[in-house]
Image: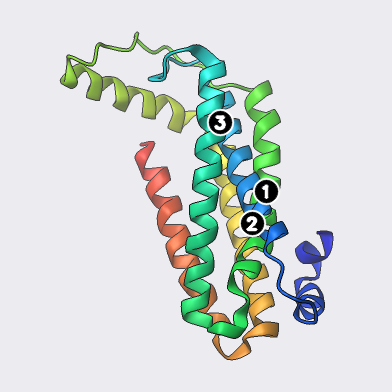
Amino acid sequence: MWDVLWQPGQFFKALAERKPNFVAPFFIVVASTVAASLGQVLLVRLLPSFVPGGLPVQLVFALLGGVVFGMLLWGLGGLIIRLLAGPDSRAWEVYGWASVPALLVGLVLVPLGALFPITGDLSPLPPATDPEALRAWQREYQQVVGAAIGTRVLQGLGIAGSLWSFWIIWSGLKVLAPSRALLATLGVAVVSLAFTLWGILAQR
């Protein structure tokens, strides 16, 4: 796994000589989204939550949501590479292995959220029968979370991890589909950065 981080060209040259294997790339993506989901729940566990049942229920939802989102992310990311780089790109393997930086970010987020949870002076969650008060509370919640140091650290790590992943994708496609490496990498980058920007703006 360390080779794909530091010597992705050599890693994918060796990969090209082996038969396709989707197991490890799939689990890398799913593990990264599960770790990120669990870490985010731990990060905001001291704040009021929409989910009843306390932290255990929130962790279960985070686990299930992380698994589902990871499956969708792996499918979508691989599909973008497959459409832009062609059938020789081994798209889903490339996307999965390129998600190792995201897995590392997720593994950092879990202890970060556990040790440094976000705190804030939030009013109690208003009843669902008062939509105006609920929207005002959501804006207040997003402001508290968005201004927290832990959120800023997470955003910085996420951007760094994304750039690292793009480099791995580009390095892999230079080996597997060199004529379309740049196009496919830019396609993944545009979609990924759009989601990242949306997530940042949603917390403002």
| Mark 2, other Cα within 10 Å: few <14 / some 14–19 / many ≥20 | many
Relative depth, front residue between 15 and 180: 15
SS state under label 3? helix
Whole-angstrom CA distance, mark 2 to mark 3, is 32 Å
Q: Residue at x 64, y 69 (%)?
A: 94
Amino acid type of the residue tagged 1 in the rendering: Leu
Compared to residue 56, the image places residue 162 above or below, namely below
Nearest the viewer among 118 and 99 is 99
Residue mark closest to the camera, 2 vs 3: 2
- Residue found at the very far bottom of the displayed protein: 179
Q: CA distance from mark 1 to mark 3?
A: 21 Å
Q: Which residue is mark 1?
A: 103
Q: Secondary structure at mark 2?
A: helix
Looking at the rendered structure, the kind of residue marked 3 is: Ile
- Residue furthest top in the image: 124
- Quarter where residue 169 is shown: bottom right
Residue 114 position, x and y percent, is 66, 23
- Where is residue 7 drawn, in percent x and y? 80, 70
Q: Residues within 10 Å of mark 3 (few under 14, many from 20)?
A: few
User: Residue sitting at 68 percent across and 53 percent down?
Assistant: 28
Residue indicated by mark 3: 149
Image quadrant where residue 19 sits: bottom right
Screen quadrant of the C terminus: top left
First in sequence: mark 1 or mark 2? 2
Sequence-wise first label, 1 or 3? 1
Q: Quadrant of the N terminus?
A: bottom right
Residue 104 is situated, as x and y percent measured from the top left of the image, at 71, 47
Which amino acid does the dot numbered 2 rest on?
Phe
Say few, some or many: other residues with alpha carbon within 10 Å of mark 1 (under 14 / 14 to 19 / 20 or more). many
**Pointer 2: what residue?**
26
Asked whether residue 167 appears in the rendered view, the answer is: no
Q: Name the residue at 62% across, 53% down.
A: 29
